[in-house]
Amino acid sequence: MVRRVSPVTLVAGGAGFLGNHLCERLLGEGHRVICLDNLQTGSLENLRRFERESRFRFIEADVCELPARLRADYVYNLACPASPPLYQADPVHTMMTSVVGTRNLLEVARRSGGRMLQASTSEVYGDPEEHPQRESYRGSVNPIGIRACYDEGKRAGEALCFDYRRTYATDVRVARIFNTYGPRMRPDDGRIVSNLIVQALSGAPLTIYGDGEQTRSFCYVSDLIEGLCRLMMVDPNPEVPVNLGNPDEYTINALADLVLDLTGSASRPERRPLPADDPQCRRPDISRAYDVLGWAPRTGVVEGLAATIAWFDASSAIKRPVAPAWPAAVGLKSAAAGGAG
C-alpha cells in the first residue's frame, strides 16, 4: 500500500485575517501548513487554535527576508497590510512587501517546482471609470498618492507574477480580492465593516467619510477562502487575473443602517472628510470566477454581518459604554466609549 504524502503549503501572512482562515481550511483538508508572518498586522492570537496541530508550523519572519531553503508545494502570498491606515503607516515597507516579498515567494515556488497564488486586490482598479470592474479593465490609479504604496505595489506584484510565468514557466495564479469581512478581523484595522461594528457595539458615533454615497461590495470570509482554494487548485492555469468578491453593491450609508439595525445600537453617524483618492464605487464582475472556477459567493450581507457582529460582540476587545451608578449620575451626561478607526 502506497502512503499518500500530505502537500506542504506555505501561507505568507498566515497570522492575519484572511491568512488564519486559510490555514484552518488547509489543515482541515490534510495539508502540512507553514505559516509565515512578521506579526506587523497579524496576531499570534489568531494561531492559538493550531497550537496542538502537528501539521502546523509557524515562522516569524518578513517576506522581504525569507529563511533560506524554504520549500513548498503550494505558496499563498497574503503578506501585506490591506487597510489604508495600516498600509499607509509604513508606505515604504508596504511597497517592498508587494514587490521584494512577492519576488521572494515566487522564487520559493520556482525552486520547489510548486504553485503560487498571489493575493492581489481590487485596488489595482483605483477609482474606476468602468463599473462593474472586469479583469480586462486597466484601472485609474494615482501613482504618487497616499494609496499608491499599496495600489501600485500590488500592480507591480501582478507584473512580477506574469513575468515569472512567461520567463520561468512558474505556475502562478492571481486573485483580485474585493472587500472581505468576517470573524477575526482586527477591531482596530480601520476597514469600514469592522469600524462600523466596533463603533456601534461600543456606543460611539459611526464614522462616515464624505457623503456616504460611495459604494463597496462585501464578501464574507468563508466565501473568499473557497474562491482562493479553487483558484489555486484549478487546472489548467487560467493565465489571467480572477476577481473574487461579492457583486452585491451597497452605499456606505446603507451599510451603516444595516449595522445599526443588526446591533440595535443608538449610535449616530459622524461625517468626516473623504480621504484622498478614495474610490467612489467598487463592484466586481465575477463572470470569470464563475466560468473558470464554478465559484460565486453564497453568503448574503445580512447573514454575514450578523455572524461578524456576533463574533465582535463576544470579543473582549470591544469597549462597552458603562451606565453610571444611581444616584451619583443624576443630572450628568453619560459618555460612550470611543470606537476604533
Image (cartoon, grey):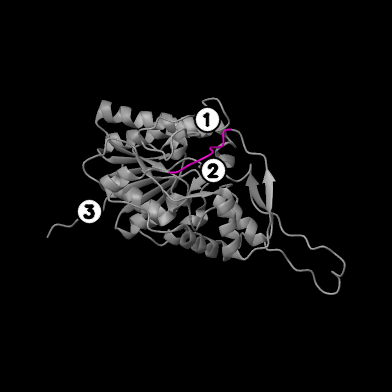
Coordinates of residue 130 in the picture (x, y in percent)? 43, 34
Q: Are marks 2 and 1 in contact (CB under 8 Å)?
A: no
How many marks the image carries: the answer is: 3
Rendered residue at 40%/29% (across/down): 138
Secondary structure of the residue carrying numbered label 3? loop
**Disc 2 residue type (three-letter):** Ser
Mark 1 vs mark 3: which is more N-terminal? 3
Category of crowding for the residue at label 2, using alpha-carbon neighbours closer than 10 angstroms: few (below 14), some (14–19), many (at least 20): some
Coordinates of residue 149 in the picture (x, y in percent)? 52, 31
Rendered residue at 58%/36% (across/down): 88
Q: Is any atom of residue 257 visible in this view? A: yes
Mark 2 vs mark 3: which is more N-terminal? 3
Disc 3 designates what residue?
Answer: 5
**Disc 1 residue type (three-letter):** Ala
Residue 145 is left or right of residue 107, and the answer is right
Residue 148 tag number: 1
The front one of 63 and 134 is 134
Quote the CA–CA distance across marks 2 and 1. Answer: 13 Å
Quote the CA–CA distance across marks 1 and 3. Answer: 42 Å
Q: What are the residue bounds of the magenta stretch? A: 277-283
Residue 66 tag number: none
Coordinates of residue 166 in the picture (x, y in percent)? 26, 27
Coordinates of residue 244 in the picture (x, y in percent)? 38, 46
